């Protein structure tokens, strides 16, 4: 009924013998469990929509959906009842909006049993459901690309993205949490490089893998510097697929003809000099 509170019958059953989904009364059959819509977090969480009978897999998913709904619609809703069997959420004083879920007997899921969807409140730019962790999650990509973003710009970004005003202290906490998420993950992934190198050696025999990670003087722990990888297949393909080339002649001649006399081409010497010293003065003197 439009504007009226809708309540699904048999909201609470005292024993497992009573089922809210079926009845022996053929004249007034109740809805079967499979007839109710299920909330799919992967699809529905971005813009949650609530209906009577909607089934949630857990109260955690339900409360996450409530927070997302509050942010999306700029409503200051709050949880007024929260125990193992039921959760009740209301809007601010004077607004009739309410939603109530209870545990489904014999299952881990929860179902919407009461829902009054009409709001009589205005949109709000203050929201108790917004915290620094949520801000960090929403704005992590922005802060990753611009870690030195000023607080004033960050505040405007949050207002535009989440449609809410937050305090500077929340923004500072959010920036610290984003830094921990970004750099904490980087440190953990650098620590996996040793295992990565060992796996390459196991799965690609005769590959060349050299990692330079000297000990840090302050921490006494290895600190990554650089990593060189040449897979065996790449080496084999280069040798068999490319024509031969000449390089490193000076070192090769020293090894092959250690007692031979060596001379240098004056034209090449002049060309090398003129890479640093431009002009005709050096050329004329040379």
Image (spheres, helix red, strand yellow):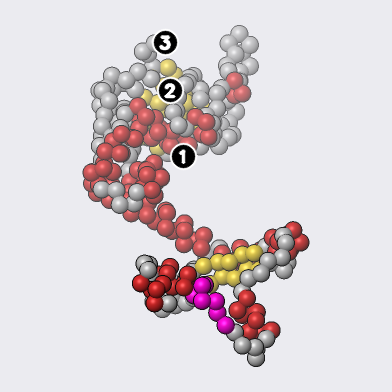
Q: Is residue 71 left or right of residue 38?
A: left
* Residues under numbered marks 1 and 3 in contact, where contact means CB atoms less than 8 Å apart: no
Q: Which residue is mark 3?
A: 1
Q: Is residue 66 above or below residue 285?
A: above
Residue 61 horizontal/vertical position (percent): 48, 37
**Closer to us: 197 or 116:** 197
The Cα–Cα distance between marks 2 and 1, rounded to whole angstroms, is 18 Å
Q: Is residue 50 visible?
A: yes
Residue 283: give its label. none
| Residue 267 part of the magenta-drawn span | yes
198 or 225: which is nearer to us?
Answer: 225
Residue that appears at 59% across and 71% down: 210
In this picture, is 137 found above or below 208?
A: above
- Earlier in the chain: of badge 1 and badge 3, it is 3
User: In terms of secondary structure, where does tag 2 sit?
Assistant: strand
Residue found 39% across the figure and 56% down from its top: 180
Distance from disc 2 to disc 3, alpha carbons, whole Å, reads 13 Å
Residues drawn in magenta: 263-269
Which residue, given by chain and number where applicable, does mark 1 sit on? Answer: 60
Provide the residue designation for mark 2.
114
- Where residue 225 sits: x, y (%)? 49, 69
Choose mark 2 or mark 1, whichever is in front: 1
């Amino acid at each position: 009924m439009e504007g009226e509170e809708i309540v699904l019958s048999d909201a609470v059953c005292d024993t497992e013998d009573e089922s809210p989904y079926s009845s022996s009364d053929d004249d007034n059959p109740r809805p079967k469990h499979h007839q109710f819509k299920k909330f799919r977090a992967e699809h529905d969480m971005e813009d949650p929509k609530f209906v009577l009978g909607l089934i949630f897999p857990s109260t955690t998913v339900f409360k996450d959906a409530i927070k997302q709904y509050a942010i999306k619609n700029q409503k200051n809703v709050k949880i007024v009842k929260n125990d193992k069997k039921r959760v009740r959420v209301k809007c601010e004083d004077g607004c009739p909006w309410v939603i109530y879920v209870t545990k489904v007997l014999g299952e881990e899921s929860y179902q919407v049993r009461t829902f009054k969807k009409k709001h009589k409140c205005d949109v709000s730019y203050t929201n108790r459901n917004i915290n620094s962790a949520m801000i960090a999650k929403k704005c992590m990509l922005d802060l990753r690309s611009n870690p030195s973003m000023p607080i004033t710009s960050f505040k405007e970004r949050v207002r535009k993205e989440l449609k809410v005003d937050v305090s500077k202290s929340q923004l500072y906490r959010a920036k610290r949490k984003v830094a921990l998420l970004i750099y904490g993950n980087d440190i953990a992934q650098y620590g996996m490089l040793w295992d990565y190198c060992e796996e390459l050696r196991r799965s690609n025999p005769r590959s060349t893998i050299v990692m330079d990670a000297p000990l840090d003087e302050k921490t006494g722990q290895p600190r990554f510097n650089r990593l060189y990888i040449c897979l065996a297949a790449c080496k084999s393909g280069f040798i068999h697929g490319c024509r031969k080339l000449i390089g490193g002649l000076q070192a090769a001649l020293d090894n092959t003809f250690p007692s031979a006399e060596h001379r240098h081409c004056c034209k090449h010497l002049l060309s090398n000099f003129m890479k640093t010293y431009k002009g005709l003065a050096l050329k004329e003197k040379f």
